[in-house]
Image (tube, rainbow, N blue to C red):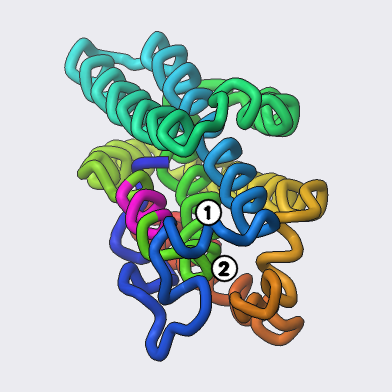
Amino acid sequence: MSTVENASPADDSAPAGAVGIAAQDWAAASASPQYRAAVVDLLGALAYGELAAFERLAEDAKLAPTLDDKAELAAMASAEFHHFERLRDRLAAIDVEPTAAMEPFAKGVDDFHRQTAPSDWLEGLVKAYVGDSIASDFYREVASHLDTDTRALVLGVLDDTGHGNFAVEKVRAAIEADPRCGGRLALWARRLMGEALSQAQRVVAERDALSTMLVGGVDGMAAGFDLAAVGEMFTRITKAHTKRMAALGLAA
């Protein structure tokens, strides 16, 4: 998820006028068992997502047409693994077994990657740039409801590693060389968006603590999203996706 460009829909700072959990540090916020469970779920989902992204990018590097391209994708994979390590270490620091925290999300993430396996180098780049960025946008939105310590960790893990421009340059050059591939890649990116949003929704819907935190709040301490805010959130994610498609030279 490290390929997010600066089109992120959510603000990296603490929400204006933050109250309750969003204004507390982890030591205070984790006194709520329900909130603690929600954060464990969130970090577990993110950690497995980063581990799977590392594995996928390392595999996609085999499709790279040049050694330079292979090295660039390997660097992206390395960044994903370092993000995984930060999340794993944080789970251990709060006395949670990392594997147990990740296990509930393994099948969903693996299914997503199996259903969106790229058929060639360009599809792999579009997935790394567009597909992962959609998931990152979702988690950035979630971060606005977290305590200050967990929010800083999540936003740090989602930081752009600077490889987004690499994907943009390669895809735009390919389209310029063969305009016919633009339509195929645009359809691929639209499919990725649908699959990524569905996965994000499943992650929340299947975990009671996480869904409670996001919709309605926890113990009256976190505001959560109301139904209107949920719609606005997905509108922001869609707009960010449209900007990334334009950067790639593809029609949204």
Q: Which residues are magenta?
A: 150-156
- Residue 41: horizontal and vertical position, in percent? 64, 43
Q: In the orientation shown, which residue stands out farthest toward the left?
A: 68
Q: Tell me which residue sits at (31%, 27%) in the image.
A: 82
Residue 134, label in figure: 1
**Residue highlighted by disc 2:** 238
Q: Residues within 10 Å of mark 2 (few under 14, many from 20)?
A: some
The one nearer the camera, 109 or 131, is 109
The one nearer the camera, 205 or 148, is 148
Q: Tell me which residue sits at (41%, 34%) in the image.
A: 93
Q: Residues within 10 Å of mark 1 (few under 14, many from 20)?
A: many
Residues under numbered marks 1 and 2 in contact, where contact means CB atoms less than 8 Å apart:
no
Q: Tell me which residue sits at (48%, 84%) in the image.
A: 19
Q: Regarding mark 2 in the picture, which secondary structure is present there?
A: helix
Q: In the orientation shown, which residue stands out farthest toward the bottom?
A: 17
User: Which image quadrant: the N terminus?
Assistant: top left
Q: CA distance from mark 1 to mark 2?
A: 8 Å
Disc 2 residue type?
Answer: Thr
- Residue 220: horizontal and vertical position, in percent? 68, 80
What count of labels does the image hold?
2
Disc 1 residue type?
Answer: Ile
Q: Is residue 172 left or right of residue 18?
A: left
- Residue 203: horizontal and vertical position, in percent? 72, 47
Residue 217 appears in view: yes
Q: Is residue 173 left or right of residue 195?
A: left
Q: Is residue 225 left or right of residue 202?
A: left
* Prevailing SS of the magenta stretch: helix
The one nearer the camera, 197 or 107, is 107
In the rendered image, the vertical position of residue 97 relative to residue 131, given as above or below: above
